[in-house]
Structure formats: C-alpha cells, structure tokens
Image: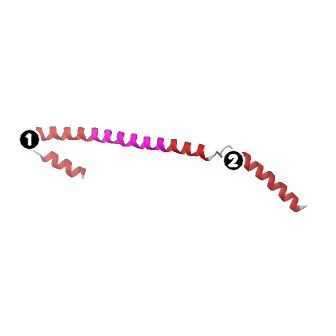
Amino acid sequence: MKNNLQERNDRILFREVRFIISPLCKNSEERMDELVIYLIIAVLMFVIGLVAGYLVMSTYYSRRFLAIAKDCERVDSIVPLISEMERES
C-alpha cells in the first residue's frame, strides 16, 4: 500500500514538474537559433560600446589638448604640457 501511494505521488509530482518545465524545453534547433541571435546581439553591443568609448575618449582628449595648446601659446612655453603629462601619468 505504501509503495503504491509513493508511486502515485511520484507520478503526480513528475506531471507537475513536466507541466512547469515543458514551455522552457525546446528542440535543439530552436535553442541554437536563439543562441546565435543572442551572440550576434552581444557582439553588436560590444562593438557599439567600443566605438562609443573611442568617440568619447577622443573628444575628451582633443578638448584637453586644445586647452593645453592654448595655455602653451599664452605662456609661450611647454611647461603646461609637461605639467599635464605629469598629471595624466
């Protein structure tokens, strides 16, 4: 009797777990398609981040260079350039 009851409970539990998990289980071809799509999205986001970072950094340093170049021109010396190099390193 106890063994029969245990088997019945196991079957009910298995049905409940299968009902919950079944929408998550897809065939391997669909999973590979989704994986390829997510990998493409990840690569695109990485490239977009690299390009955006490059543009932001180049804009920042070009502005800094122009400000230091104006200081060098105003002082007529390279001391501001050397102090900026010390500050950045």
Q: Secondary structure at mark 1?
A: loop
Q: Quadrant of residue 56?
A: top left
Residue found at the far left of this picture: 76
Verify CB contact (< 8 Å) between mark 2 and mark 1. no
Q: Would you say residue 42 sits in the magenta stretch?
A: yes
**64 or 1: nearer the viewer:** 1
Marker disc for residue 21: 2
Q: Residue at x 71, y 46 (%)?
A: 20
Marker disc for residue 76: 1
Q: Residue at x 19, y 38 (%)?
A: 66
Q: Quadrant of the N terminus?
A: bottom right
User: Mark 1: which amino acid?
Assistant: Asp
Q: Quadrant of residue 30?
A: top right
Extent of the magenta region:
39-58
Residue 26 picture location, percent across and down: 64, 45
Residue 21 picture location, percent across and down: 69, 47
User: Distance between the Cα atoms at labels 2 and 1?
Assistant: 74 Å
Residue found at the far right of this picture: 1
Q: Residue at x 39, y 42 (%)?
A: 47
For disc 2, the neighbor class at 10 Å (few under 14, some 14 to 19, many from 20) is few
Q: Would you say residue 88 sits in the magenta stretch?
A: no
Q: Quadrant of residue 76?
A: top left
User: Mark 2: which amino acid?
Assistant: Ile
Q: Secondary structure at mark 2?
A: helix
Residue 72 picture location, percent across and down: 13, 41
Vertical arrangement, residue 40 with respect to residue 6, above or below:
above
For disc 1, the neighbor class at 10 Å (few under 14, some 14 to 19, many from 20) is few
Q: Earlier in the sequence, mark 2 or mark 1?
A: 2
